[in-house]
Amino acid sequence: MRSASRHGSSRLAAALFSVSLVAGLQLGLADSASAAVTAGPVFNKPTGTVAEQQAIRTQLLDYINQSPSGSSIKASVYHFWDTELAQAIADARARGVDIQLMLDESDVSDNVDDPTYPILTAALGTDLTKSSFVGLCPVNKSCLGEPSQGASINHNKFWLFSQLDGAYDVVVQTSSNLTPSSYSRFWNDAYVLPNNVTIYTAYSNYFGKLVGQDWANWQYSSTTSSPYKAYFFPRPADDPSPGDTITGVLDNVTCTYTENGTTKHTKVRVGMFKLTRLPVAQKLVALKTAGCTVDIVYSQTDSGSSSGTWETLHASGGPTLRCYNWDDDNDPATASRIIHSKYLLIEGKYDGATGQKVLWTGSHNYTGPALTKNDEALLKVDVDADHDAYVTDFNAVKAAAVPGTADNTNACKGIISTPET
């Protein structure tokens, strides 16, 4: 069993960063003050107050505002439609912060009238050889995806801050885009990791690869700095060691085991926007059959296609499933309420050891493109208290999920596609 001292420090600032989903209170940052930067999760609550909805946004805004002259900010984001955050970036650049952003091309083409991108280009420029810039991946292509594999996107959502108040080398890995619906309609998470030069450098090197857009020489990679591990995608289809990162993780789960003379069962929880990768669905079913407790909250699968993950997951004896894909205002022009997070929680026996509590989170949906085409990042966290905080979030999303178990709907089955923004 891992010691409490090894993991307890990461939760010391929970009252400053997190949304208490049990009590329904926002414990985020005040607009007028900065808080200590400490490792741990941040969750938004789209059904809560404005402060609860914007917990992740507020965190990022605070970090941008406190970045000192001479420091740097790097970020790779799918969609960025938030003029206040853009202006904060412009102000940071004016006071001497080097800022580099890489966005998906659809950030512009999907919302041509939004003023965010013009604010960014005016402040940062678009020359990728400069110390500050805002860049776009190619049209209908991720920065590192192989063109022959078809359309792809830069789906990343991470931020890197070289220096903040009392912290350095800060990674913020989130599932959240910077758009109104990401705050008020979608459940999202973020994980803050400061003072870890190994993980920060790995993310920074990956960012450099995105800027270089040298897809021909790109290789899928991962970096470990215990208790963390970062994975960087795409994982090319012709990778010399092909495989599915997520099924590889799940292969390390032992479902039924004995500890102190007691038979126990590992718990697997998945909070996922899109789950359409058949091998992942099949593995989750196999784990349930093997004795694991498998609990899934999702917003979209697929049905009746060559994958058919909805049918696979709904076979007799399969996992517990709840869909959260609810057009609560009956207006197809507005975003539905969904879970937009992409996390996996394992509690029990993992990688041969009992008493484990491990989580994976990031931008990586369990879809085919997320594995082999898109620019994505995934972060593993082996910290008990952080896992438990994610379980609290998972239970809150599960309780709020509509249509819930009555998920035989076109939206839940992917017959009607659910947009991300």
Image: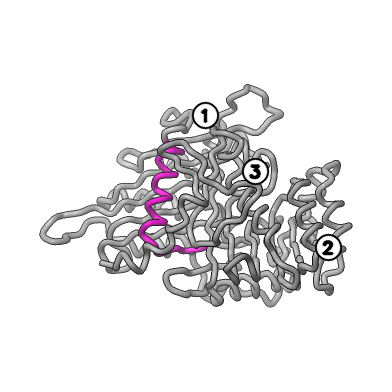
Q: Which residues are magenta?
A: 378-398
N-terminal of the pair, mark 2 or mark 3, is 2
Residue projecting furthest to the front: 32
- Residue type for callout 1: Thr
Q: How is the image coloured?
A: one colour
Mark 1 element type: loop
Split into 4 quadrants, where in the image is the C terminus? top right
Label 3 belongs to which residue? Answer: 420
**Majority secondary structure in the magenta region:** helix
How far, Cα to Cα, is label 1 from label 3?
A: 18 Å
Label 2 belongs to which residue? Answer: 94
Mark 3 element type: loop
Label 1 belongs to which residue? Answer: 409
Residue 74's x, y, as percent? 70, 66
**Above/below status of 163 relative to 402:** below
For image coordinates 62% across by 41% down, the residue present is 183
Q: Toward the viewer: 363 or 93?
A: 93
Q: Is residue 151 visible?
A: yes
- Residue type for callout 2: Ala
Q: Is residue 306 visible?
A: no
Q: Toward the viewer: 32 or 367?
A: 32
